[in-house]
Image (tube, grey):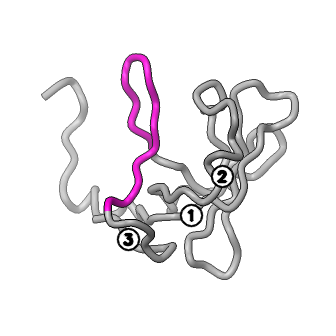
Amino acid sequence: MDNKEIISFEDFSKLDIRIGTITSAEKVTDADRLILFSVDLGEEKERQIISGVAEHFPEPQALVGKQVPVLANLPPRTIKGVVSEGMILYVVGEDFITALSPLQGVVPPGTPVR
């Protein structure tokens, strides 16, 4: 193991990670790194999520329709005047970043990740 802190299963179980479907994605004006996503988590209202990944996804509209894991129980945070209501989880390597997707095609938005 590396130097990451070990957490208990109880701590892990506090994370509300769900599959969301990206319904829109656009670069944030006056912010080189930020993309504003609308994500369907199977709730009454879609979530706005801001993510600093624009350099890795130069055509954010290509992400529309993709399914991604979302950490849904973070408190809202205002970034560049826009409220972000969660965090999209990515796989991050030394020279790449990519989103995870379900292996068996499309799953219902809001499906829990365990």
| Range of magenta residues | 90-103
Q: Which residue is mark 3?
A: 112
Res 34 quadrant in image: top right
Give the side of residue 10 with respect to residue 80, left or right: left
**Residue found 33% across the figure and 66% down from its top:** 104
Q: Which residue is mark 1?
A: 21
The first of marks 1 and 2 along the sequence is 1
Q: Are marks 3 and 2 in contact (CB under 8 Å)?
A: no
- Extreme bottom residue here? 44
Image coordinates for residue 26, horizontal then vertical, percent: 77, 44
In this view, the residue in front, 107 or 17, is 107
Give the side of residue 85 with respect to residue 114, left or right: right
Q: Amino acid at mark 2?
A: Ile
Secondary element at tag 2: strand
The first of marks 1 and 3 along the sequence is 1
Secondary element at tag 3: loop
Queried whether the magenta region covers residue 101, the answer comes back as yes
Q: Which residue is mark 2?
A: 49
Image coordinates for residue 52, horizontal then vertical, percent: 63, 33
**Residue found 74% across the figure and 40% down from its top:** 79
**Residue found 58% across the figure and 28% down from its top:** 56
Give the side of residue 52 with respect to residue 79, left or right: left
Image coordinates for residue 92, horizontal then vertical, percent: 40, 30
